[in-house]
């Protein structure tokens, strides 16, 4: 199916954080429709799957304004100008969980709701961790929740852990976890 | 950590599809911040993991306005007033993929970006399928892409399939797939 033609665009609203845009589209069958979207704002995000030397996932519990609730999730944030995805992941991990990572690996670029939003977030696997706290823009300290990798399935199905991108990120890292758990018990120099 | 106090809210923009709200918050440490969010609009969504009698997943390829691209994903849509999640899943499957489902099972309620949006979408597993096309509000026919369950890992890691909620949905259904694949080869009355 060919892409629809964009006949016109219109900015409907711009706030500090969001922009809403209208797209007037003509589909290949001649049907015309007005769509609305939150267009790509430039910066992509990173979501960090960090595993420590004890084979624990570093989860955080933070305020989720969308639901006015404290929620369990993974460290994440926006990539800054001229920052690599790996550097952004290590910085966000230090700001939100108090650890730096000597090894980072890009796993996959994810979208959230591509029908309505141009936002993408990159899953980064982080290991060889060391204590390293950076000051982010968080209004209050974030609670760190180490979670044993052995209990991954329990986490994925828990009502406490329901953010789709975090569940997707952990599921995509499962082969990497298996490698680590196979190696567990053996002495290693790596964290 | 206690929830911050909501001091004030303000609607910053309302369009046909979106609403942007500002929240003035006071955190328990006294820090005050203005957050912005897309508040819950009332209707939740459903995302449908449908498997046919040939143990194929029913994927669709449709226009994604957020990126102005055709993208591979799962059937999904909003739950209508007084409609159950299971009924919404079966309806969306009929509108977008041309199949009804005699069996539906709620798997998990997911959020997308709970820091910024109050939207939730429910994963529904659908089986015992039968040909049943309903007319939805789609501007053009949607391409149906049957995908063998056997090739699930290839799909999850493919650059063509990158919607976090779809990857999360399939990953959460993996135990249900295993049951089906174990039963494959045996004669069965179920679709």
Image (cartoon, coloured by chain):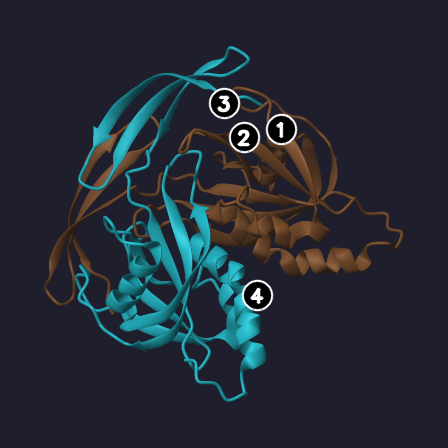
Chain colours: A brown, B cyan
| Residue ranking furthest to the right | A187
The answer to whether residue B70 is visible is no
The residue marked by circle 2 belongs to what chain?
Answer: A
The answer to whether residue A80 is visible is yes
Q: Quadrant of the N terminus of chain B?
A: top right
Q: What number is the disc on residue B175? A: 4
Q: Quadrant of the C terminus of chain B?
A: bottom left
Check if mark 2's residue and mark 1's residue have beta carbons within 8 Å.
Answer: yes
Residue A144's quadrant in the figure? top right
In three-dimensional space, the C-alpha distance between marks 4 and 1, rounded to whole angstroms, equals 31 Å
Q: Residue at x 57, y 65 (%)?
A: B175
Which percent across, then down, holds residue B16? 17, 40
Which percent across, then down, holds residue B54? 44, 82
Q: What number is the disc on residue A143? A: 1
Taking A182 as reference, is A149 left or right? left
Mark 4 closeness class: few <14, some 14–19, many ≥20 residues within 10 Å: few
Relative to B55, residue A44 above or below = above
Mark 2 closeness class: few <14, some 14–19, many ≥20 residues within 10 Å: many
Q: What number is the disc on residue B3? A: 3
Relative to A40, residue B89 above or below = below
Mark 1 or mark 3: which is in front?
A: 3
Element type at mark 4:
helix
Residue closer to the observer: B55 or B64: B55
Q: Earlier in the sequence, mark 3 or mark 4?
A: 3
Residue closer to the observer: A165 or B67: A165
Q: Both on one chain, marks 4 and 2? A: no
Check if mark 2's residue and mark 3's residue have beta carbons within 8 Å.
Answer: no
Name the residue beneath numbered marker 2.
Answer: A62
Element type at mark 3:
loop
């Amino acid at each position: 199916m060919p892409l629809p033609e964009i006949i016109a665009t219109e900015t409907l609203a711009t706030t500090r954080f969001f922009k809403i845009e209208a797209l007037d589209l003509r589909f290949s069958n001649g049907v015309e429709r007005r769509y609305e979207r939150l267009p790509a704002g430039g910066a992509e995000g990173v979501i960090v799957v960090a595993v420590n030397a004890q084979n624990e996932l570093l989860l955080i519990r933070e305020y989720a304004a969308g639901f006015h609730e404290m929620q369990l999730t993974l460290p994440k944030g926006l990539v800054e100008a001229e920052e690599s995805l790996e550097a952004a992941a290590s910085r966000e991990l230090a700001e939100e969980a108090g650890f730096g990572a000597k090894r980072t690996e890009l796993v996959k670029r994810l979208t959230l709701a591509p029908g309505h939003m141009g936002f993408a977030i990159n899953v980064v696997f982080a290991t060889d961790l060391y204590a390293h706290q950076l000051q982010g823009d968080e209004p209050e300290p974030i609670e760190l929740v180490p979670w044993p990798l052995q209990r991954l399935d329990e986490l994925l199905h828990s009502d406490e852990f329901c953010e789709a991108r975090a569940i997707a990120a952990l599921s995509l890292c499962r082969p990497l976890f298996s490698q680590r758990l196979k190696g567990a018990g053996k002495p290693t120099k790596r964290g």
